[in-house]
Image: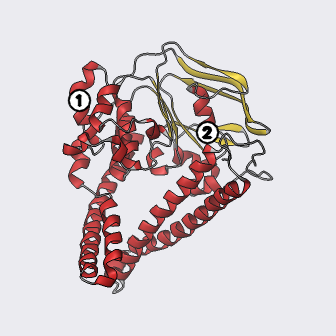
């Protein structure tokens, strides 16, 4: 069963988390020794200060939060909706001359759990916005079923938080009276504890703001959740917290995501957006990848059907950018994608080595492990570069 598989994967991930925690502690200790050494030299004080800032920004792994906080986190029970939750008929969406969706149909029954996957620019976010009435269709219609109550998380949801409020005040403002006693527990599950709840939103990191925006979704009863890239900026513990809550959620679910681990076992239907159309697979993301004979989600991102290429926008973007700026952003996305591919390939080779039992007898074990950790850090930075450039393109209506 998908859930039992998820539990198994989660146990494996816990072991990896414990190893990651130990590795991180070693890295922190090493950096602190280096900083102390550099601070003692006048010529290297600036470098030491820069290293200290980077160390302060490092997101620390806390093992004890995972099992205690995630255990009882639940979405409120979904109010009963009609048998059909969403029905889209012949929906078309154009941006000027750029065709994104072409006469697509979609019908979701109560309790359906669907993943939207595919290349960027193929209309995943566009259809999600049309469904939640954040964007009009160029043609066609979308109808919601009886008593459908939507909870929506947009890619830029965290940008809509009010900077002058504290974390706790943000939750209090979004909370019905009956949920007030649970606010600190929910915040704790998303790694806000103790004095963290009194921090102003304006001083939170991007990841913290994303966690707070997601936490607010657990305050009210929705029977249709539409989540657009909810795992962007989330650490592994927060992903587990969110996934476990979604596994137990009893409403209809739409998730736009590129995160294979997060999607695995979470949905029972996968819809690929390709060539302006929807292609439905009756299984989770692993079933979809098997049917498409693709190795991973990066392959989905890089693939296209025979004879076709991703659409190139010709209409003026919603956000005015110069030609040079658009070209720079496009080049940044392309370079970041190539860098991610290269790093993932290098990591895969090292992981294959490390999976061999004889690896731990290899005199180069420590050297390879250090190289592996450095590549992981570099990959994380490359992914952040790719996401930032991609978001800028999407904001300009180019992606």
Could you tell me how many numbered marks the image carries? 2
Q: Which mark is on residue 117?
A: none
To which residue does mark 2 refer?
124
Q: Are marks 1 and 2 in contact (CB under 8 Å)?
A: no
Crowd rating for badge 1 (residues with CA inside 10 Å; few <14, some 14–19, many 20+) = few
Give how far across and how far down residue 172 sits, in percent. Answer: 29, 28
User: Looking at this rendering, what residue extends furthest in the bottom direction?
Assistant: 363
Residue 249, given in percent of the width and then of the height, sits at 38, 30
Q: Could you tell me residue 319's position as x and y percent? A: 65, 42
Instruction: Tell me where residue 34 sits by quadrant.
Output: bottom left
Would residue 24 be seen by someone viewing this image from the given angle? Answer: yes
Along the viewing direction, whichever of 140 and 163 lies nearer the viewer:
163
Give the SS element for disc 1. helix
Q: For residue 290, say whether it is visible.
A: no
Image point 27% across, 34% down: which residue?
A: 168
Position in image of residue 55 (x %, y %): 31, 65
Asked which secondary structure carries label 2, the reply is: helix
Residue drawn at 36 percent across, 82 percent down: 367
Q: Is residue 129 left or right of residue 100?
A: left
| Residue situated in front as seen by the camera: 55 or 383 | 55
Query: Can you tell which quarter of the image residue 165 is in?
Result: top left
Q: Quadrant of the N terminus?
A: top left
According to the picture, the residue beneath numbered tag 1 turns out to be 182
């Amino acid at each position: 069963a998908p859930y039992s598989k998820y539990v198994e994967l989660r146990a494996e991930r816990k072991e990896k988390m414990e190893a990651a925690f130990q590795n991180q502690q070693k890295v922190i200790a090493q950096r602190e020794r280096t900083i102390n050494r550099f601070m003692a030299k006048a010529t290297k004080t600036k470098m030491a200060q820069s290293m200290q800032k980077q160390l302060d920004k490092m997101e620390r792994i806390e093992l004890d939060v995972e099992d205690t906080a995630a255990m009882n986190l639940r979405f409120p029970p979904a109010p009963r909706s009609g048998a059909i939750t969403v029905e889209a008929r012949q929906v078309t969406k154009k941006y000027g001359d750029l065709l994104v969706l072409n006469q697509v149909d979609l019908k979701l029954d109560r309790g359906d759990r669907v993943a939207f996957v595919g290349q960027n620019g193929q209309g995943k976010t566009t259809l999600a916005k049309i469904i939640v009435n954040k964007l009009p269709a160029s043609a066609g219609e979308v109808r919601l079923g009886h008593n459908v109550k939507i909870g929506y998380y947009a890619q830029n949801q965290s940008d809509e938080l009010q900077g002058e409020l504290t974390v706790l005040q943000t939750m209090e403002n979004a909370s019905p009276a009956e949920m007030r006693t649970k606010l600190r527990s929910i915040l704790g599950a998303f790694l806000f504890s103790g004095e963290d709840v009194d921090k102003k939103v304006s001083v939170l990191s991007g990841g913290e703001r994303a966690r707070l925006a997601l936490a607010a979704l657990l305050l009210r009863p929705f029977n249709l959740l539409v989540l657009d890239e909810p795992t962007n900026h989330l650490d592994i513990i927060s992903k587990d917290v969110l996934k476990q809550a979604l596994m137990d959620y009893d409403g209809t679910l739409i998730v736009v995501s590129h995160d294979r681990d997060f999607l695995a076992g979470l949905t029972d239907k996968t819809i690929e957006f390709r060539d302006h159309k929807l292609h439905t697979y009756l299984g989770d993301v692993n079933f979809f990848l098997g049917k498409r004979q693709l190795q991973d989600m990066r392959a989905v991102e890089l693939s296209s059907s025979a004879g076709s290429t991703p659409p190139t926008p010709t209409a003026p973007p919603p956000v005015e950018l110069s030609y040079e700026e658009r070209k720079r952003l496009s080049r940044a996305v392309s370079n970041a994608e190539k860098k991610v591919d290269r790093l993932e390939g290098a990591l895969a080779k090292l992981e294959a080595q490390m999976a061999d039992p004889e690896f731990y007898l290899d005199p180069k074990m420590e050297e390879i492990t250090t190289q592996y950790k450095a590549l992981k850090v570099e990959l994380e930075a490359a992914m952040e570069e790719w996401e930032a450039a991609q978001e800028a393109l999407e904001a300009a209506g180019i992606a």
